[in-house]
Amino acid sequence: MQHITPKEAHALLQSRPDALLIDVRSEIEYLFVGHPVGAIHVSWNDGPDWEVNPNFVGEVKKLAGNGGHRPILLICRSGNRSEVAGEALEQAGFTTVYNVSHGFEGELDANHHRNSVNGWRFDGLPWAQC
């Protein structure tokens, strides 16, 4: 799995129309915190019990088609859940998996706030919120 910055991920998505950006956060995060424009939501884990989604790999396989060889970019809040989800995809045979480092909201700053150090939103990349 390759780790790329949000800006690198955005550039890759622009240059590879076949690439998929999968947001692995919970449904609530995806809808109400916001998400990258064009991201497809497939939770890695979700409430109320926060157990790993047993259908995650199958759902991504269905979206990816063609044997899992198209680029799959994974994003979460800060890059941790997406990394674990990416490892699961690689174990299932996906060959081109990218983890978006720092995720959508980025790392915590000195005051324990996100969106002020790095991440998709901090970098000013396109995002939407419902």
Image (tube, grey):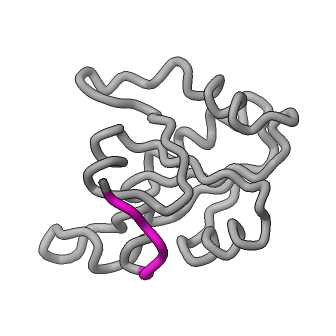
Q: Residue at horizontal 45%, vertical 35%?
A: 43
Q: In which quarter of the image is the C terminus?
A: bottom left
- Residue 114 is situated, as x and y percent measured from the top left of the image, at 25, 68
Above or below, 57 against 35 in this view is above
Q: Residue at horizontal 73%, vertical 28%?
A: 92
Above or below, 62 against 87 in this view is above
Q: Residue at horizontal 55%, vertical 20%?
A: 55
- Residue 100 is situated, as x and y percent measured from the top left of the image, at 55, 61
- Write the start and end of the magenta stretch as one range: 123-129
Residue 36, magenta (yes or no): no
Q: Residue at horizontal 43%, vertical 67%?
A: 127
Q: Is the magenta stretch mostly helix, strand or loop?
A: loop
- Residue 93 is situated, as x and y percent measured from the top left of the image, at 79, 32
Q: In this view, does 105 lie to the left or right of 22?
A: left
Query: Residue 100 versus residue 62: which sits nearer the camera?
Result: 62
* Numbered-mark total: 0
Looking at this rendering, what residue extends furthest in the front direction? 130
Query: Residue 114 versus residue 39: which sits nearer the camera?
Result: 39
Looking at this rendering, what residue extends furthest in the left direction? 111
Above or below, 116 against 37 in this view is below
Query: Residue 27 versus residue 81: which sits nearer the camera?
Result: 27
Q: Is residue 40 left or right of residue 129?
A: right
Which image quadrant is residue 28 in?
top left
Q: In this view, does 15 lie to the left or right of 125?
A: right
- Residue 38 is situated, as x and y percent measured from the top left of the image, at 56, 57
Above or below, 15 against 30 in this view is below
